[in-house]
Image: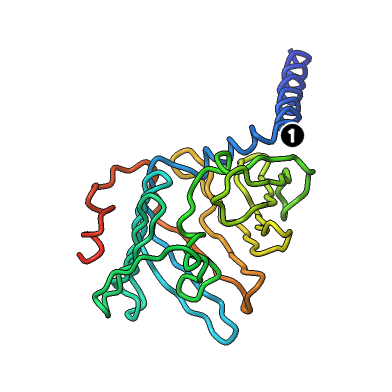
Amino acid sequence: MKTIEVKLMALIIGGCSLFSSVLSQDPLMMLNRVDKNMSARSRVFESTMTIHGKRNDRTVQSKTYSEGSNRSFTEYLAPASDKGTKMLKLEGQLWIYSPSADRTIQISGHLLRQSVMGSDLSYEDMMDDRKLTDLYTAVFSGNEKIGDRDTWVLELTAKVNDVAYYKQKIWVDRERFIPLKQELYARSGQLLKRTELSDVQNIQGRWFPTKVLYKDMLKEGNGTEFKMSNIKFDQEIPGYIFTKAALKK
């Protein structure tokens, strides 16, 4: 009986090893697993964004609704100076409502590369929620450890023109299939941004990092910490949320 158990365990370990080996030879399969965790039909969450500036820190709280990769709505809740500011993304276009001016403006073109509220995130970063498999080809480049986690390292190259970063290097957790680190590059090869993803939780059956540290490599300061809470996937969101009329409500 003990012999059978030992053989069974060997088969399980061998199967896991074979699965891991097959994945390491197929970077597209790895990216598909990452997309399944990171993308959703819809998502609702609250967030705290702390901007670690050169002299002081600043924290902004908000609530975001998103549906697919084309529709999202964010309302800023605090501090008082930003409360009521709203952002609406519809089909690649972005509008911002300022309650102090009672005015809605459209952000487009090169303005999308500007910082959001002085953070290390640009409007492009906030807007682009498309799947990696829709944007990039991938090449497996090795194995590394991030802390105590084993990761696969993938090098991604854009296969469409409308991406903010031509190349990416990502470290994928081998067990949970989520990125733990990303480096984002311009076409010239210059490193533009670095992200570190942590506080991984299992939410509705999927692994998801709830904290992201963004660092704009071209900017002074110690980065921007983005923490998400009360995350709900695949929720029914009323259609009026994703309308310009909702900006002034």
Residue at the spot x=52%, y=41% of the render?
37
Q: Is residue 5 above or below residue 233?
A: above
Quadrant containing the N terminus is top right
Residue 144 is left or right of residue 111, and the answer is right
Report the amino acid beneath label 1: Ser
Quadrant containing the C terminus is bottom left
Residue at the spot x=34%, y=68% of the render?
76
Mark 1 falls on what kind of element? helix
> Quarter of the image holding residue 11?
top right
Out of 150 and 90, give the one closest to the viewer: 90
Image location of residue 49, percent across then percent down: 47, 69
Residue at the spot x=61%, y=41% of the render?
176
Out of 208 and 109, give the one closest to the viewer: 109
Image location of residue 102, percent across then percent down: 24, 75
Q: Is residue 240 above or below residue 133?
A: below
Residue at the spot x=32%, y=64% of the render?
75
Residue corresponding to mark 1: 24
Are there few (<14), some (14-19), or many (20+) residues within 10 Å of tag 1?
Answer: many
Image location of residue 43, percent across then percent down: 39, 48
Image location of residue 25, percent across then percent down: 75, 31
Residue 230 is left or right of residue 4, and the answer is left
> Quarter of the image holding residue 40?
top left
Q: Which colour assignment does the render follow?
A: rainbow
Out of 159 and 247, give the one closest to the viewer: 159
Residue 45 is left or right of residue 17, and the answer is left
